[in-house]
Image: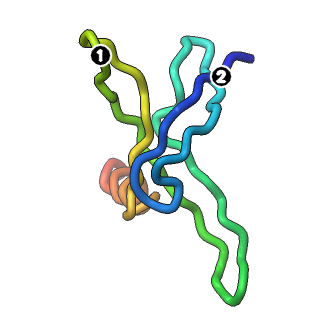
Amino acid sequence: MKSTDTEFVGGPLDGKVLPILLSPFHNVPKVYRVPVPAHGGNPESVLVYRRAKEYGAKGRWRWRYEYDPEGDSRARRWSASAGE
């Protein structure tokens, strides 16, 4: 499987560049979830990063991930309202 080095912006992974597996259509996932295990009395949690375009030199762009402090609550609200 192919991967691409993708930058993370904001949150605990700010400034990190990690290899992300590409989909069959050569895109990175829209949402990237990072599970954080329980440690030192803190409960387990999930960091949520959302895909965004980053523009570089000569008008070219590439994907990067931006931290979403609300996490999955945005997705839950949307799915709850969609069923009404």
The mark closer to the camera, 2 or 1, is 1
Q: Residue furthest front?
A: 57
Circle 1 residue: 57
* Label 2 to label 1: alpha-carbon separation: 22 Å
The 10 Å Cα crowd at callout 2, few under 14, some 14 to 19, many 20 or more, is some
Answer with mark 2 or mark 1, whichever residue precedes in sequence: 2
Expressed as whole percent of the image width and height from the top left, the position of residue 60 reads 32, 13
Q: Is residue 79 above or below residue 62?
A: below
Camera sees residue 79: yes
The 10 Å Cα crowd at callout 1, few under 14, some 14 to 19, many 20 or more, is few
Front position in the image: 84 or 72? 72
Camera sees residue 80: no
Expressed as whole percent of the image width and height from the top left, the position of residue 36 reads 66, 65
Residue in the picture at 65% in, 59% down: 35
Q: Residue furthest bottom?
A: 41
Q: In the visual, does 21 lie left or right of 48? A: right
Quadrant assignment for the C terminus: bottom left
Circle 2 residue: 3
Expressed as whole percent of the image width and height from the top left, the position of residue 68 reads 39, 55
- Which quarter of the picture shows residue 45? bottom right
Residue in the picture at 48% in, 38% down: 7
Amino acid at pointer 2: Ser
Expressed as whole percent of the image width and height from the top left, the position of residue 76 reads 42, 58
Q: In the visual, does 77 lie left or right of 43? A: left
